Image (spheres, rainbow, N blue to C red):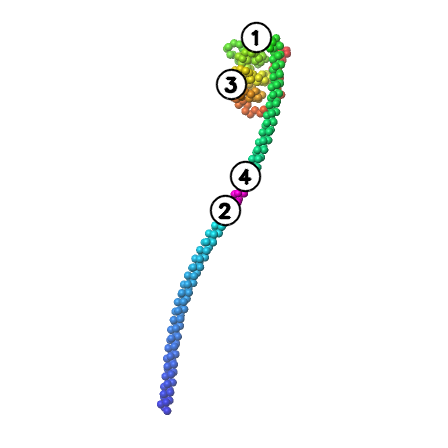
Amino acid sequence: MDIVIGLLMGFSISAVVGTGIQRTALEKQSQGEEIRLEKLRQELNSVHELELQQTIQSLKTDYLQQSEAKEIDLKQNYQSQLAKAIAAQKQEAEQAIAAQKQEAEQAIAAQKQEAEQVIAAQKQETQRKIEQLEDQHSRELETLKAKILAALELQPGDTNPIPQAIASKIEPLDGEISHYQTADLPQLLNSTYNPDPIIRQQAVLAIGNIAADKKVRIEIEQAIPILGKLSQDTEPSVRLAAVTALAKVNSQEVVTYLRRTLNDADSNVMQAASEAIAKFKRYTPKVAKPAPANAAAKSKLEA
């Protein structure tokens, strides 16, 4: 009985001891598993962290690439729209400029046409008045010529309608035409009707010398129509002398006669007329009431 009890106690003690040992072993095994699990968890965390960083880097790279592509696309769209807008504005500006240019050309053409019409009307009116003056001067010259011939008791066919006093001064070949004074104007004007072109030339040159004296104005202005008619004389020497004399007259009235000689057949006459007109470049054509031609000669003849 004691043996059995001893055996039972032995078995019980063995079981308790075995259980304790087994429990200790299990605890050690459990601790090892926990350490292994912790290591595994740490490894998994490291792998997960690495994969997460790689994923983040990949997403970042993709985002940057997509952003750059979108930025390029936006820039291209903007440049395209900007180019279209600029082209449209340029076209509108060109159309507006073309319209303004057309309007300006039309306005200029209208103004030019209006100015041409005004100039043509003025030219026609001036020509009409010039013709009236020429006709009036021609009649006055013919009347004066008739009175001169009557005063000299000569007929129109006579060849020397010059008083002896003036003939003695003109006919010599010494050419001293500077001897004549204002008082000689009536006789000089009479001599312009002489059929001898040399005498007509000398008389005209003498009148021109007198015209050079700025103090002699009224008397010379009365001689302008006669000098103007002599600028159309049949002899070039007489025409040249008449143009030269007209150039010395301080009156804008001579420009009308000078212009008629610009197309003269003689080049010397044309040149002299051109140089004379240059002195009156600011001249504006105007028609003034003509002074009685040769008033001094008329008064002397009537006396």
Helix, strand or loop at mark 1: helix
Q: Residue furthest right?
A: 302
Residue drawn at 56 percent across, 35 percent down? 105
Work out how far the residue at label 2 is from the one at label 3, CA to CA, in angstroms.
70 Å
- From the viewer's perspective, is residue 9 above or below residue 50? below
Helix, strand or loop at mark 4: helix
Residue drawn at 44 percent across, 59 percent down? 59
Residue, disc 4:
98
Residue, disc 3:
266
* Mark sitting earlier along the chain (2/3): 2
Under mark 2, the amino acid is Ala
Residue drawn at 52 percent across, 20 percent down? 270
Residue, disc 1:
164
| Mark 2 surroundings within 10 Å by alpha-carbon count, few (fewer than 14), some (14 through 19), many (20 or more) | few
Under mark 3, the amino acid is Asp
Question: Of residues 212 and 281, which is closer to you in this image?
Answer: 281
Work out how far the residue at label 1 is from the one at label 4, CA to CA, in angstroms.
79 Å
- Horizontal side of residue 20 vs 255, given as left or right: left
Work out how far the residue at label 4 is from the one at label 2, CA to CA, in angstroms.
22 Å
**Label 4 near label 1: C-beta < 8 Å?**
no
**Label 2 near label 4: C-beta < 8 Å?**
no
Residue 183: x %, y % from top left: 58, 13
- Count of number-bearing discs: 4
Residue 133 in which image quadrant? top right
Residue 116 in which image quadrant? top right
Residue 83 numbered mark, or none: 2
Work out how far the residue at label 2 is from the one at label 1, CA to CA, in angstroms.
99 Å
Q: Which residues lie in the magenta part?
A: 88-102
